[in-house]
Each structure stands twice: as C-alpha cells, then as structure tokens.
Image: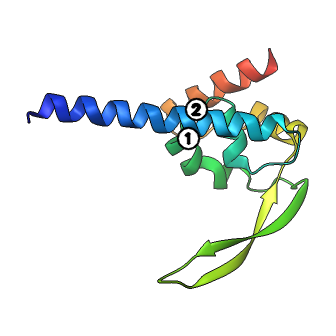
Amino acid sequence: MNAKARTARQTLRQRAINFRAARKARRAVASGTPQTARTHLVAAGIETSVAKRFAGAFSNRVTPTTTTTAPIKLKGRVRKAAVVKLYDFAAFAARLAVYRPKDRAAAARFERAAHQLAA
C-alpha cells in the first residue's frame, strides 16, 4: 500500500465523518430546540474539528438560553454530570455575527458561515 492510497482513504473517511456530523447537526437545529454551540457551528457549515476547537471560546461570556446536565466520561467507567449550555437559533446567530477567532483561516470560515446564515 502506498502513501497516496492511504491519504486518499483518510480523506474520504474524514469527508464522510464531516458529512454525517453536519447532517445530524442540521436535523437537531431544525427541530427548534436549543442546542450546544458546537452543534450550531457544525450545522452552519464549519468542519467538526474546527467547531470542537472553537466552541468553548465561541460560547464564552454569552448568556445561554437554557442549561442542562449531561454525563461526561472520565477515566475507566467513571462518569460525571456536567452542566451544558444550550443556545437557541437567535442567540447563536447574534454571536456568530460578531465572533471571529484569531486564527486567520478559522476566522474566514466563521465569516463565511455568518454571511450564509444572514442571507
């Protein structure tokens, strides 16, 4: 197996992962219930890895629409209940209109997503 074939397979795998995540996020947002910042970002067209990276900073200093608790996995079988902030579409759109990360490539993605959402 050569490196080209391996890279091509990895690219296809990553595209499939991103497509499935985006489809799932769009369905969740379309339901009208408040969702996490990461779900909103993926539904807006930002890749899953970028959304995961910037979701914390995106939701920083923003008043959530509601909060809930969700289990998170720690080491082994241990789980802990953590507070999760949820945002409705209006709160997400308002934050997306003004938030730009310092990374230029990510900032361009956020800007494109904000323009598409506003249109």
Q: Which is closer to the viewer, label 1 or label 2? A: 2
For disc 2, the neighbor class at 10 Å (few under 14, some 14 to 19, many from 20) is some
* Residue ID at (81%, 40%): 92
Amino acid at circle 2: Ala
Q: Which residue is mark 1?
A: 102
Amino acid at circle 1: Lys
- Above-or-below relation of 110 to 84: above
Where does the image place residue 112, in percent across and percent down from the top left? 64, 21
Q: Quadrant of the C terminus?
A: top right
Where does the image place residue 99, in percent across and percent down from the top left? 71, 38
- Residue 91 vs residue 20, the one in the foreground: 20
Where does the image place residue 6, in percent across and percent down from the top left? 19, 35
Q: Which residue is mark 2?
A: 107
Left or right: residue 66 versus residue 43 is right
Reading the chain from its start, which is encountered first: label 1 or label 2? 1
Q: Secondary structure at mark 2?
A: helix
Q: Are marks 1 and 2 in contact (CB under 8 Å)?
A: yes
- Above-or-below relation of 31 to 56: above
Q: How is the image coloured?
A: rainbow
- Residue 35 vs residue 93, the one in the foreground: 35
- Please give the label number shown on residue 8: none
* Residue ID at (15%, 28%): 4
- Above-or-below relation of 2 to 91: above
Left or right: residue 107 versus residue 97 is left
How far apart marks 1 and 2 lie (CA) works out to: 7 Å
* Residue ID at (25%, 28%): 8
Residue positioned most to the top: 119
Left or right: residue 103 versus residue 36 is left
Q: Quadrant of residue 74?
A: bottom right
Left or right: residue 101 versus residue 13 is right
- Residue 105 vs residue 75, the one in the foreground: 75
